[in-house]
Image (cartoon, rainbow, N blue to C red):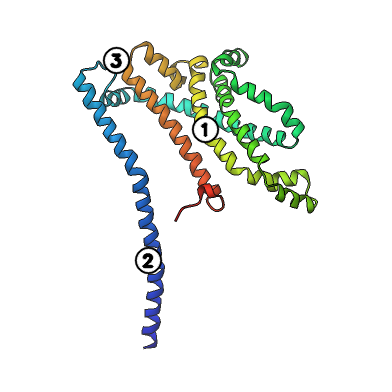
Amino acid sequence: MARQIVGTGRMAVSKEKTIPIMTKWKVAQKDIVKKVLPPVLALVVFVIVWEVLVRALGIAHYILPKPTDIYGATIDNWSNLFMALRTTVIESVIGFIFSVIIGIGVAVFMASSKWIERSFYPYAIILQTIPVVAIAPIIVIWFGSGMNAIIIIAFTIGFFPMLSNTLIGLNATDHKLKDLFQLYNASKWQIMWKLRFPAALPFIIAGMKISCTLAVVGAIVGEYIAGVGGGAGGIGYAITVAASRLQTPYLFALGLSAALLGIVFFLVVSFLSRKLLSSWHESELESE
């Protein structure tokens, strides 16, 4: 009898443990359905309406291609599209990494002294306001055409959001906490790395979300001006070639590929944000 009671108790405990896990799984499934299903349905309806309207109106494929035309162009030019996409991914990732490292480094340097911030921040704003197409030819003259110039252009576009957001985060630290650190004789750099930088992490992540998509834009713009042809050409170069040949369905395929690349970058940074902030910051805390 005692064994039966103990066994029954174990089953009860195991059931109590299993029920919350199953409940969480069902909640997670419902959450996924709520978030994913509406945009997927909207996309399906949009594509169907697009296909039907273009067929009904008899619009030429070189003016407005049907979704099936775009799909066919993607299949026909898949090898070229893949090579162009791979080149742009490499350029965007390297430009983004440089913008994050240098942007955070310069922001920390500026935040270390109000005098330094007032001296250099206006020039960072001026750099941001200059159109990329205006400075891109200068970058090509200095660094030559090809991947080096494109990475620098991608970095230039993604740099300012990282600098600005990081600087705002470092300057938004609670003064009471800073006073507490100073009360315990913490040095300026201890306050920076143990208080101000962790507190600025949500702002840094926000800057990364902006910078990662701008790096893709910068890489494609750079490829228009500083790109190289052949198998080494990226999406920007492929777009110029497709436009010169009036390959409109392939143009749409290239544009959608660039958009998907930006979305993937954003989702990767969002995943990183959840990993770093979900345990303590309100922006990533799961609502019950």
Residue 9 place in picture, x, y as percent:
40, 79
The answer to whether the residues at label 2 and label 3 have Cβ atoms under 8 Å apart is no
Q: What residue type is labelled 2?
A: Ile
Going by the image, does 60 lie left or right of 156? left
The N terminus sits in image quarter: bottom left
Q: In which quarter of the image is the C terminus?
A: bottom left
Q: Where on the picture, by quarter, is residue 47?
A: top left
Above or below, 82 relative to 241: below
Q: Which percent across, then down, holds residue 198?
A: 64, 46
Q: Which residue lies furthest to the bottom in this view?
A: 1
Q: Looking at this view, is 90 or 116 the one in front?
A: 116
Indicate which disc, 1 or 3, sits on the residue closer to the N terminus: 3
Q: How crowded is mark 3: few (under 14 residues within 10 Å), some or many (20 or more)?
A: some
Count of numbered badges drawn on the protein: 3
What residue is at 42 percent from the left and 25 percent from the top? 83
The residues bearing labels 2 and 3 have C-alpha atoms spaced at a distance of 58 Å
Question: In which quarter of the view is residue 151 placed?
Answer: top right
Return the residue found at the far right: 185
Q: Residue at x 64, y 31 (%)?
A: 102
Mark 1 residue crowding within 10 angstroms, few (<14) / some (14–19) / many (20+): many
| Residue tagged 2 | 19
Return the mark for residue 212. 1
Q: Which mark is residue 100?
A: none
